[in-house]
Image: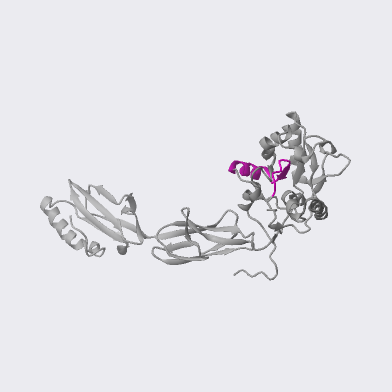
Amino acid sequence: MKLSKNMLLVNTSIIVLSISLLLAFRLIDRSFPDVHVLAYPTVGGVVQGEQLEGQVVVTAEANKGYRFLGWVQNGQVVSEKATFSFKPSNEQTITANFQKYMAEIKLVASENLGGQVYGEGEFDFDEEITVIAEPKFGYVFEGWIKDGNIVSEHLDYSFVVKDDALLEARFKLDLKSQTLRISDGDYFLALVNKDTYLGRYAPTDLVSINKDMLKYPQWRYELREEAYTNLEKMWKSAKEDGVVLYIASAYRSYDTQSQVFNENVNRHGEIVANRSSARPGESEHQLGTAVDFVAHKNGRLMDFEGTPGALWLMENAHKYGFIMSYPKGKEEITGYIYEPWHYRYIGMDAAQECKEAGLTLVEYLMTKPQFFEKPAEYVNN
């Protein structure tokens, strides 16, 4: 076997090997066909060959920044393994094909879509790059996450590319620095609590609730159309199971909520009142997707816990897109006392996901995109 001069261009370390192989093959079998072992491109890697038991064994090893693609003979890939053996029948050339390694860096924003990310793409091995995270209004940046670990807490993160990577820019709501005004009350997953504000938002698709479903049929209660459609289905299903639910409250305007809250303040003081009722602009009832239930027409909200209706809703409400907003023992998270009578419509898929995750509604909504009005003086630093 005789190695071509081209092979000597691959790596100077092969020169000694070339001579030894030439001598060895001639001593073993002077009639053995010449095999030319090449690398393409020549800087892509090191190739070696030897005669072993009547076969030729070739080996390829990629240089830093390259990867081995395969062995090629007569324009055809004959093996994708770095070590390949064959029995030559005549003089021939076999080439190890290498490719310059381009690492793919992918960037994603956290599930809540609390900001933008910049800088993904394909890069050379050992290239230094910088990726950038930019939180949107109402959010702060927590850090860059790779394989579940924080690799940087800086908005601009520079690193040397070593391999493909997926980086997540994690953002969280900035609820403590200021009260955030919700820009879209029609959004079923809008986070409404003591740290956000609806202003004088009013739904435009309110429909009247069937009087048979009301605690006070002489009054008019309203709900947004999609929420009401699913409420009616839920009410009928409960009735088929022998449970009658009565609705004691549904949509409340900003002004109505202001009246309710002020009455509670007059009775109990503002601190106590705000544990069981929301300030105007902070109530889920203003969304037109929240309802309060009682067990019978003479029932009170405070007596609903443990009733057949309460138990049925805990088991089934999520199937119709409703979630209890203020569960037991979660006041530190929700900001309100346990209210087994208060349910909010968020859509069937979302309600199912929330239920399976075992999260309170406020915790679940924090994982979803939220949209707030940016004050005119706001500057994103």
Q: Which residue occupies the foreground of this view, 12 or 211?
A: 211
Residue 319 image point, x, y percent: 67, 38
Is residue 243 visible in the rendered image? The answer is yes
Left or right of 130 in this view: 205 = right
Q: Quadrant of residue 171?
A: bottom right
| Residue in the image at 75% along x and 51% along y | 273
Seen at 59% across and 57% down, the residue is 172
Residue 237 visible, this orientation: no
Q: Nearer the viewer, residue 87 or 80?
A: 80
- Residue 342, magenta (yes or no): yes
Toward which corner of the image does residue 357 lie, by quadrant? top right
Numbered range of the magenta stretch = 336-357
Image point (76%, 56%), residue name: 281
Q: Could you tell me which quadrant the C terminus lies in?
A: bottom right
Percent position of residue 234, x then y: 73, 36
Which residue is the extreme one toward the left?
27
Residue furthest to the front: 268
Closest to the observer: 138 or 195? 195
What colour scheme was applied to this rendering of the protein? Answer: one colour
Q: Residue at x 77, y 40 (%)?
A: 301
For residue 1, which quarter of the picture? bottom left
Give x and y (percent) for residue 344.
71, 45
Q: How many marks?
A: 0
Where's residue 193, x and y in %?
69, 53
Q: In this image, 306 relative to 140: left or right?
A: right
Question: Compared with residue 242, is residue 153 higher up or lower down, i.e. above or below?
Answer: below
Q: Is residue 186 magenta?
A: no
